[in-house]
Image (cartoon, grey):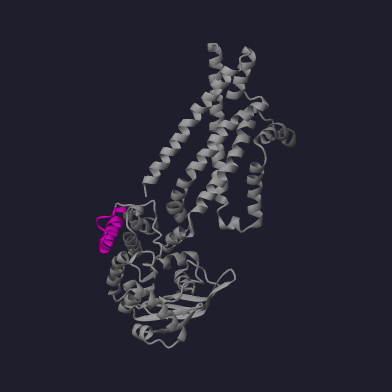
Amino acid sequence: MRIEISKVNKYFGKLHVLRDLDLTIEAGEKLVIIGPSGCGKSTLLFCLNGLEPIDSGDIVVGETSIVKCNRKVLRKTRQKFGIVFQQFNLFPHYTALENVELALKVVLKIDPKMARERAVDVLTKVGLSDKMGNYPSQLSGGQQQRVAIARALVYEPEILLLDEITSALDPELSGEVLDVVENLAREKTITIVFVTHEIPFAQKIADRVIFIDNGNVVEQGPPNMLFCNPCQERTRQFLSKVTHQLNLKVG
Amino acid sequence: MAPYDIYFLLKGALVTLALSAGAIGVGSCIGAITGWIRTLKIVKNNFFLWGLTSIYVDTIRGTPLLLQVYFVYYAIPPLTGMKTSVFFAGVASLALFQGAYVSEVVRAGIDAIGKTQWWAGHSLGMGYFQVQHHIILPQAVRIMIPPFIGVCLGVIKDTSLVSTIGFIELAFSAGIIGRRTLEPMAPWIMAAVIYFIICFPISKFSQKLESRLRKKG
């Protein structure tokens, strides 16, 4: 499903977060967004499914403008999205299984037995078939994030939004989460928008990388071009900082 | 103390229990509704609606309960022409008092659940009330329990203030016995013990409930 973002402006009070941002995301594209913290990349992600309202401009998902549509249509459109947050945002009072099946039961109102079957399937897919009865507090960070991915996948979304899903995890645990994402990325039809600092991983899965700074797209291109041979000075600066940290980690 | 005195005191205790139950029951409903309304965006962003609810909450929280009891008992009848019995005045003033405090407990509990839980719910296509029902309230209630029980215990003890309008509850009964027998110590201590016997299990129950809910995640 194609997403067209045109002339989007977003303010937090006086702070101008997104400035006349234009971007088109093709159906099935694996798009990686990088940029310094506070540049608006997470905000952009939250605007895509209407979690954050925008101040001007338009966002069209498929055929529907999520800015102009009514609430009912917005809720329907959101079911085409799956979103995974940096801090997991699991429901702490539900087990892993209940977290995943909740939306099926409450929103789609499908038969509880079928909901359970589907939730079990998805949890198995992310490798958590033995942890389904656990509460989030009884799971490791990596496991919690995989539950969150399963929850995002339960509608079989056409678009998956991933907001720095590994930055709250230590490197060992982020590996297991990235493996899950890598498997998902093999599916041709699903669109993935991935905000991340994991440059080696981005290189592996991305069709296109965009670098955002100051609320706008500074540079974009295929991963090899943008990472290895960026045109803009600002991109180069940012990448040298990030890769420097990466080298330190590895070294 | 004669057996008759003890019987009299226990009768007072029953009245205190009835008064507390009435005030807590009615007051908690008032508080839950008021508190919930005050978390709604339309109310929060509307000067008039917010002010209206604030007048209630802040007036009650900003004035002594004793004066509120007096007001309901002495001032309401001439103002409205309504006749108020002692029991009605007692339950009404305590319920209004409980309601104001509970409303803040409820509001704080709901507001304590962060934006990110709303996001998680909304992103699954859930509407406002669905998120509230399945995600926010179950967590908020857990946070509300200790302060809510605290307010209830306060109201149980504050029922003694209603004795000032001639309501014969536990404290008043103890006073009557003390004045009649000229031995005030015994009935007062007994009354204190009875208050404690009423309150202690409630706070124990609250702790148990809390730890049971905490086990769940």
Residue located farthest toward the top when viewing the structure as drawn:
B2
**Residue A180 falls in image quadrant:** bottom left
The residue that appears at 63% across and 53% down in the rendered structure is B50
Tell me, yes or no, if residue B169 can be seen here. no
A32 in relation to B148, above or below: below
Tell me, yes or no, if residue A57 can be seen here. yes
Report the front residue among B184 and A24. Answer: B184
Residue A159 placement (x, y as % from top left): 37, 71
B15 with respect to B134 (left or right): right
Report the front residue among A193 and A34. Answer: A34
A223 in relation to B115, above or below: below
Residue A230 placement (x, y as % from top left): 40, 86
Write down the region rendered in magenta.
Answer: A111-132
**Residue A26 falls in image quadrant:** bottom left
The residue that appears at 64% across and 26% down in the rendered structure is B163
Q: Which quarter of the image is occupied by the N terminus of chain B?
A: top right
Residue B91 placement (x, y as % from top left): 60, 32
**Principal SS element in the magenta part?**
helix
